[in-house]
Image (tube, rainbow, N blue to C red):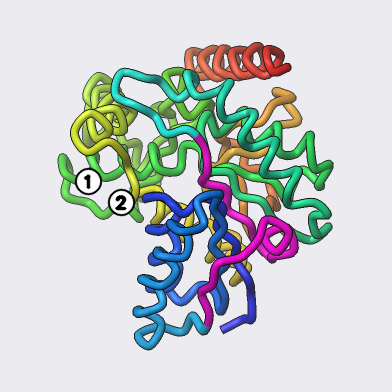
């Protein structure tokens, strides 16, 4: 295993589950847990350390924000949690202050670090992180619509009985109500997905994927396992230079905003921007999604 250090900032349900997922998948040799609530961070670290003998992660420890700033990868999960009835955008004001404070305490930040934003609203906070750190844009990403995409593919699999890995369908744009399921070019082995399911059914399943987080929050107050698995996949693609094509929050030169689009992800962060074929309606929806994000970012003081 490559000797890497991954810092997780925020030792709550998402952060601790991400740490466990990283360990189970043998992604990193060292994990640093950081949280304002030191007792919670220490307790999670102690609990997770009991799993060390069963995987290749050698060290998990509590640490400081400055130590996190020198890690190979820093995952930011901290912030106000979405409550029942709230949208991700409702968290903007509170989480802008929290993320700004975290990044300030991480300074000086390694010039080679890759930042992964998980806190919501993830698109705007990813852009904020890049602005505040002045890191190269390819080194600052967000989890974005990767989880929405995986949920959509999972619902499609349940309908047609074909594994998610063979379903080439993406949800892009804003990780929120304005996200855009790309139905027009979705395919399986080059065959249009609309040969298997109607456009209306695919849209219905995309809406179900979009609303799943709200359903889970209403019933268990959080989501943790899916997002932890997604973040683990992002870290693995970076650590092992896999260059997977993933729909994550990155800077779009075309739209001049951070939002989810398919990119390759490797050791240097974002590699290639993958052009995805869109219908006229999908292009219009993506432009609207980008405009809404631009307008929301302008409200940050």
Residue 20 visible in image: yes
Instruction: Choose between 17 and 122: the one closer to the eye.
Output: 17
Relative image position of residue 252 (x, y in whole percent): 70, 32
Residue 188 visible in image: no
**Can residue 183 be found in the magenta stretch?**
no
Quadrant the C terminus occupies: top right
Task: Single out the residue that lies furthest toward the front.
Answer: 39
Relative image position of residue 57 (x, y in whole percent): 49, 80
User: Which residue is depicted at the point 62% across and 15% down?
Assistant: 296
Residue that badge 2 annotates: 164
- Mark 1, secondary structure of its residue: helix
Evaluate if marks 1 and 2 touch, with contact meaning CB atoms under 8 Å apart.
Answer: yes
Relative image position of residue 68 (x, y in whole percent): 67, 60
Q: Neighbour class for label 2 at 10 Å: few (<14), some, many (≥20)?
A: some
Tell me if 46 is positioned left or right of 4 in this view: left
Q: Neighbour class for label 1 at 10 Å: few (<14), some, many (≥20)?
A: some
The magenta stretch is 59-79
**Can residue 75 be found in the magenta stretch?**
yes
**Label 1 to label 2: alpha-carbon separation:** 6 Å
- Mark 2, secondary structure of its residue: helix
Q: Is residue 280 above or below residue 242?
A: above
């Amino acid at each position: 295993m490559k000797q890497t250090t991954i810092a997780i900032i925020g030792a709550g349900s998402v952060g601790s589950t991400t740490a466990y997922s990283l360990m189970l998948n043998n992604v990193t040799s060292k994990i640093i847990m950081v949280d304002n609530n030191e007792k919670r961070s220490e307790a999670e670290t102690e609990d997770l350390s009991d799993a060390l003998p069963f995987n290749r992660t050698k060290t998990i420890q509590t640490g400081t924000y400055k130590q996190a700033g020198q890690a190979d990868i820093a995952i930011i999960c901290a912030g106000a949690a979405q409550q029942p009835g709230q949208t991700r955008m409702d968290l903007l004001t509170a989480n802008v202050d929290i993320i700004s404070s975290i990044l300030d305490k991480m300074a000086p930040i390694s010039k080679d670090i890759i930042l992964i934003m998980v806190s919501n609203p993830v698109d705007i906070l990813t852009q904020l992180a890049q602005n505040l750190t002045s890191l190269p844009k390819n080194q600052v990403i967000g989890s974005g619509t990767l989880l929405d995409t995986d949920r959509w593919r999972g619902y499609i699999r349940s309908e047609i009985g074909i594994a998610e890995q063979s379903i080439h369908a993406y949800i892009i744009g804003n990780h929120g109500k304005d996200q855009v399921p790309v139905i027009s070019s979705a395919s399986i082995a080059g065959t249009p997905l609309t040969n298997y399911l109607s456009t209306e059914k695919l849209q219905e399943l995309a809406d179900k994927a979009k609303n799943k987080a709200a359903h889970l929050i209403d019933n268990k107050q959080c989501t943790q396992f899916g997002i932890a698995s997604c973040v683990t996949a992002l870290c693995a693609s970076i650590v092992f230079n896999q260059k997977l094509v993933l729909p994550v929050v990155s800077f779009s030169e075309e739209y001049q905003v951070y939002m989810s689009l398919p990119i390759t992800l490797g050791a240097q962060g974002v590699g290639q921007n993958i052009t995805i074929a869109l219908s006229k309606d999908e292009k219009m929806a993506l432009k609207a999604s980008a405009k809404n994000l631009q307008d929301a970012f302008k409200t940050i003081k």
